[in-house]
Amino acid sequence: MSDDTGRPRRPRGARPLGDLIADLVDPIVARKAGMTTGLIQAWTEIAGVRLGEASRPEKLVWPPQRSPDDPFEPATLVIACESAFALRLQHEASQILSRVNTFFGYGAVSKIRIVQRPVRIERPDRKPKLKPLTADDHKRIADGTQNIASPRLRAALERYGATVIGRNGASDPRKR
C-alpha cells in the first residue's frame, strides 16, 4: 500500500519493539555475520531446547564469488558450542543442517563448522543461601572455639561454624 505521494504507508498504532530493533539490527548482522536475526531468534527451535541453550549460530561464511556469473555455492554455518555439547551437536549436524535450510527455504548451507567456546551468558549462582545467624548461634560458635590457642585457627573455625550453621540451618546437637 502507498499514499498519494507514492511512498509506502506506515502501519498505524504501536509496533512491537522486536520488530523495530530487527529493522535496525538486521543490516548490521547481515554485513558482519552474513545472516539475519531471524536465524538467531529461531535457533532454539532449529537445534532443539538442549542444544539451543548450549550453542548459537555465529556466522555464515559464503565462498568468494570471482564474477557475477559464478554458480551459487552454499555457505558454511559456524556454530559456537559449549564443549560439553560439541559431540552431541556433531552427531545431530545433518538434522540441524536440514532444519537450517528449511528455515531459509532453500539449500543455503552445505556444511557446519563447530567452534567450542562459552555460550551461556548467565551462570547460575551455585553459592548456597545462608540463613542469618542468631545471637544464640554466635554464642554456640564462640563457646566451641574458646579453647583454641591460635587466633588464626580460631577465626577460621568460627567462619566455618557460621557457614555450616547458616547453610544447613543446623540444630543444636545438644538438643537431640
Image (cartoon, rainbow, N blue to C red):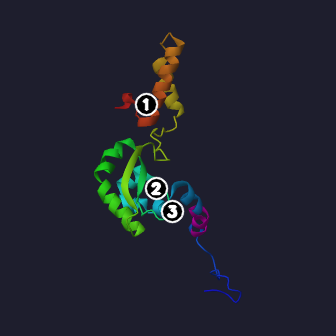
Q: Quadrant of residue 76?
A: bottom left
Instruction: Name which residue type carries label 3.
Output: Thr
Upstream in sequence: badge 2 or badge 3: 3
Q: Which residues are magenta?
A: 19-26
* Residue assigned mark 1: 164
* Residue assigned mark 3: 36
- Say if 44 sits above or below 55 in the image: below
Q: Residue at x 43, y 51 (%)?
A: 78
Instruction: Name which residue type carries label 2.
Output: Leu
How crowded is the residue under tag 1: few (<14 C-alpha within 10 Å), some, or many (20+)? few
Q: Residue at x 42, y 67 (%)?
A: 104
Q: Nearer the viewer, residue 115 or 61?
A: 61
Mark 2 near mark 1, Cβ–Cβ under 8 Å? no
Q: Residue furthest top?
A: 149
| Left or right: 126 in relation to 19 | left
Q: Main secondary structure of the magenta part?
A: helix
Position of the C terminus by quadrant: top left
Q: Nearer the viewer, mark 2 or mark 3?
A: 2
- Say if 129 sits above or below 38 in the image: above
